[in-house]
Image (cartoon, rainbow, N blue to C red):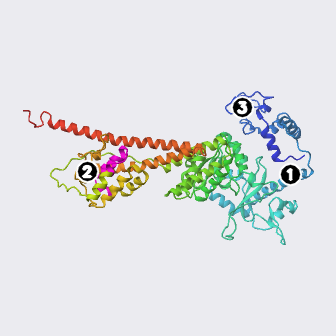
Amino acid sequence: MALSPQWLDELRMRTTLSAVIGRTVRLTKAGREFKACCPFHNEKTPSFYVNDEKGFYHCFGCEAHGDAIRWLTDQRGMPFMDAVKELAAEAGMEVPAPDPQAAKRAEKRASLHDVTAAAQDWFEANLRGADGAAARAYLSRRGFSEKTVREFGFGYAPQDRQASKAALSRFDEKMLIEAGMRIEVEGKDPYDRFRARLMLPIHDARGRVIAFGGRILDSDSNPNAPKYLNSPDTPLFDKGRTLYNLHRAAPASRQTGRIIVVEGYMDAIALANAGIAEAVAPLGTALTENQIELLWRQVERPILCFDGDNAGQRAAMRAIERALPMLRPGHSLSIVRLPAGMDPDDLIREKGVSAIEELLSSPASLLDTLWEFEKAAAPLTSPEEKAGLKARLMHHVEAIEHPDIRALYKRELTQRFSDFAFPPRPQREFKPRGEWKKGGFKAPSPQLSAEAERRLKRAIEGGSRDTLASAVIHGMLRHPGEIARHEAALARVAQSDRNVGAAIDSLLAAAETLDSHAQSPISLPEGLPAPPANIRFAFLDEGTDPVDAREELAEAVSLLVERPALEAALAAATARFESDPEGAFVEQQQLLKRKLEFEARLGQMASRKAASATAKDSDAAQDTGPGSGASTD
């Protein structure tokens, strides 16, 4: 009876391995795993571990390894089908009825394994022969040790188009074609797929050769030929369900607790050659959902280590997009970005294995990589471009199927976007009040026309204004040279706040009749109206240095402009609560934080005024104190 791999995978997922093994072996909880003394060899210290999440057992002493089916066949001596039937009954699954066609396919797969195994022996022999000199020279230039060459099964495919047919003549040509060794073209004789290439075997999880990859050695003779060529999909090989080197990397990952995904199989071999054995690679495609599941069976956070060029970063993003809908608690991806223009082999050659180990020790999270990639994907100089960034981020978030993870991603990315798009204004460094220069020329006060005087006075005295707005208006009267400088900002305030609109409009109109460089206060026949008693700003103090006063006034104008925009954003975030409670809450909290900062800056301006007044009083006391030269009569 032939059982499909999908059905067997479902059976393994429904089986709790520790419960099966625990019937005959006493297991002890050890973190997320169970441990025991190995039942396959005598030992006093436990080295046998069972992992329910990954569905396998492993002994670090005798290397016994397998799943629930393997346990029943190896430890209890049950035939394969009996083991399957027992586990299926416990899992509530029906064993599929015998399928003659499936049996034939299984038989064909067994015979195709014979083809690929024989082809691998032939490729290896070619590498050792006279025809393999160029391939051996390439391996030497790459710095691959003899151990690495043997372990990874390097071989060589000769140039002759009919070489494999002659070497593997014991197999029918149709089998060679079905195994991917030969190419059949209508109207022409079949010919070898791999010619004049350095060959590598591709294995399944059980270590059987199922396909091949070949690297061209002489690209000059055929510039249109692909640099790397893999077997096509066959009954043995599905490139979307296969990870190169997994059968070697999986045991190594159980020692290190990590598994590394690189772009190509030569990268995986370069890492193994440097002593990093837990590396795998996809086979000519972006990382697929099936491959991500294979990785998660080994570790919860596989490390993607792609090249530092644009193609490598796009490959990492394609993997992230595939992973987002699959994210589940505890399972994610980590990403290492290599230096620009370098692959793992380049980095090891130039800076040694310690350089790549340093990168692998501190990978970026999936979320960090997603944020940085999208932030760098397009210019962000206009409000529309910034809104586009948020739209791209939210598109990724909506792809996440797990509700808790989706909510957490949304909150974190919304927070980062708010911090980026609405940064708090930097505080102006306060400069101490300078000293007046004695004897300097004082310009005459600028005069207004009678109509301008009348309109301005009426506007200032009327309406209902808050402290900050009144302070800015009176500050402009005292420093009319600043009106033109802040014209655009004042106009925006006038449009957004009807309580100050008339006064600002009159102020702007009056300024048109003045010398634009006037630095003295505007003079009215009855004198300037006094600001409200509760206004405490240094730029309204006649004793403040003019330079300091103008800087302080500029900061007050910026606060006056910022406030309505801040209040409007708060109102908009509050209005969005029903349609987007998570995003609205995060944005509202950010805006409330900015509002507190706003109030603090406003308070600091008043504090500086108070500090300035205190300093003046202290100076005056010293001038009239003992020893000051003042008369004591």
Q: Residue at x 76, y 27 (%)?
A: 26
Looking at this rendering, what residue extends furthest in the bottom direction? 187
Q: How far apart in space, not on screen, are marks 1 and 2 (Cα)? A: 93 Å
Element on which disc 1 rests: helix
Q: Which mark is residue 546?
A: 2
Where residue 306 sits: x, y (%)? 61, 53
Where residue 600 sits: x, y (%)? 39, 40
Q: Which residue position is annotated with label 1?
A: 110
Q: In this picture, is 624 found above or below 576? A: above
Where residue 378 sits: x, y (%)? 54, 58
Q: Main secondary structure of the magenta part?
A: helix
Q: Which mark is residue 263?
A: none
Magenta part of the chain = 459-483
Mark 3 or 1, closer to the camera:
3
Q: Which quadrant is home to the C terminus?
A: top left
Mark 1 or 2, closer to the camera:
2
Element on which disc 3 rests: strand
Q: Which residue position is annotated with label 3?
A: 34
